[in-house]
Image: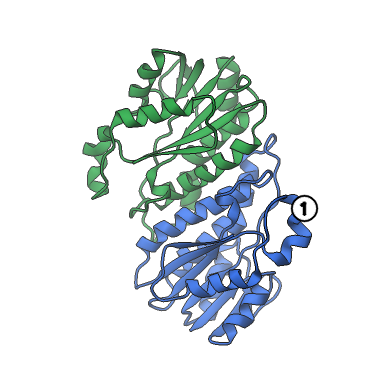
Chain colours: A blue, B green
Amino acid sequence: MKILIIGANGTIGKKLTPQLARQHDIITAGRNSGDIRMDITSEASIKAMFEQAKDIDACICIAASGPLDNFSTLTSQQLLEDFNGKLFGQVNIVLIGQHYLNNNGCFTLTSGIFADIPYKGVTGGAMTSGALHSFVLSAAIELQRGLRINVVSPGMVEDSAAAYGHLFPGLKPVSMQSLTDAYQESLNEKITGQIFRVY
Amino acid sequence: MKILIIGANGTIGKKLTPQLARQHDIITAGRNSGDIRMDITSEASIKAMFEQAKDIDACICIAASGPLDNFSTLTSQQLLEDFNGKLFGQVNIVLIGQHYLNNNGCFTLTSGIFADIPYKGVTGGAMTSGALHSFVLSAAIELQRGLRINVVSPGMVEDSAAAYGHLFPGLKPVSMQSLTDAYQESLNEKITGQIFRVY
């Protein structure tokens, strides 16, 4: 398989990319690194990425989480800004990429635990992930040409626990291996519309 | 209880309002009818509504569903427009209303079955409902002063089956009574962060 990995240089991407490279051809894309430089908030940049990448069988997007928020002063304008990268960026990768991936190709997106298990200060992230889950369920029955789509919903990965653990007391870190295995499993040919909850 | 019902004149509201009026004081709000005229897409209008309503113990929002969409040509701009009323409108009712409801007051929002069960042509509606579910889970642990929040996720109600049933083959209509009972149950004093799936 020829796999395009967006966010290959992030915390998860750095571990997932070499794991997949053992069996697959990998093209990496990212804002500041990778074979292709791209801006996930720009539809034109996403389109240019797919034009350049060519002949893609799978596209994995590992999008980072958004900022913390304060519920008592939160506005819909802030939520909208939160949505731009992780939600609309990933949605655009599918809406645009559906016209570029090879037949029977596969998308894997990234959501997060807060869709289902709330913590304080992450309402925007929770809504992004909840919307992504429903998007993936819908897209799985809409996509043509045998295209598939899944989403990995990570808890806090062990590699991030030192930096972020204090913000989410009681949230148990998950192993990086279980997380990268979920991305790998999402590529399997019979799986679509699945939410891989890794926590 | 003094209950503010937004959308009291819609398909569900017309049945729910008299049911609740047997035991509660009701104030109705809507775009074209009701005690208070309001535009759910305007933060200023929502604020003015709460200023006018005063002393509210519960706020129920019955928001209508959005337009159908075509996945192969769908854009994030269309999704954003879909989000404005049913998603951001309801979110703003809570973000603004949290500063107006009486202590131990209660919000009840309206999502829909497509958050969890996909049908073709309703990706925007599905994402709106999925985001609302995660919003309600988050808001339930964020709200202060004993405020509570729940959401009712209706399937296709029997009163709408004649008009919309042909669009969703195989989707069984649910009884109006089961739906209005869910809104009524959401007001119960010990319930918060609950998604009432009525289908």
For residue A37, say whether it is visible: no
- Looking at the picture, how far across and down is residue A146, in whole percent? 35, 72
At mark 1, the secondary structure is helix
Looking at the image, which is closer to me, A68 or A117? A117
Residue visible at 69% across and 34% down in the picture: A72
- Looking at the picture, how far across and down is residue B129, in whole percent? 46, 44
Res. A162 image quadrant:
bottom right
Circle 1 packing at 10 Å, graded few (<14), some (14-19), many (20+), is few
- Looking at the picture, how far across and down is residue A142, in whole percent? 36, 61
Q: Which residue is mark 1?
A: A166
From the viewer's perspective, is residue A24 above or below residue A195?
Answer: below
Left or right of residue A191: residue B11: left
For residue A86, say whether it is visible: yes
| Marker count (numbered) | 1
Q: Of the residues shown, which amino acid type is indicated by label 1?
A: His
The chain identifier of the residue carrying mark 1 reads A
Looking at the image, which is closer to me, A37 or B129? B129
Left or right of residue A17: residue A139: left
Res. B182 image quadrant:
top left
Res. B51 image quadrant:
top right
Q: From the image, which quarter does the C terminus of chain B lie in?
A: top left
Residue visible at 59% across and 85% down in the picture: A21
- Looking at the picture, how far across and down is residue A128, in whole percent? 57, 52
Looking at the image, which is closer to me, A98 or B128? B128
Residue visible at 56% across and 51% down in the picture: A115
Residue visible at 63% across and 21% down in the picture: B103
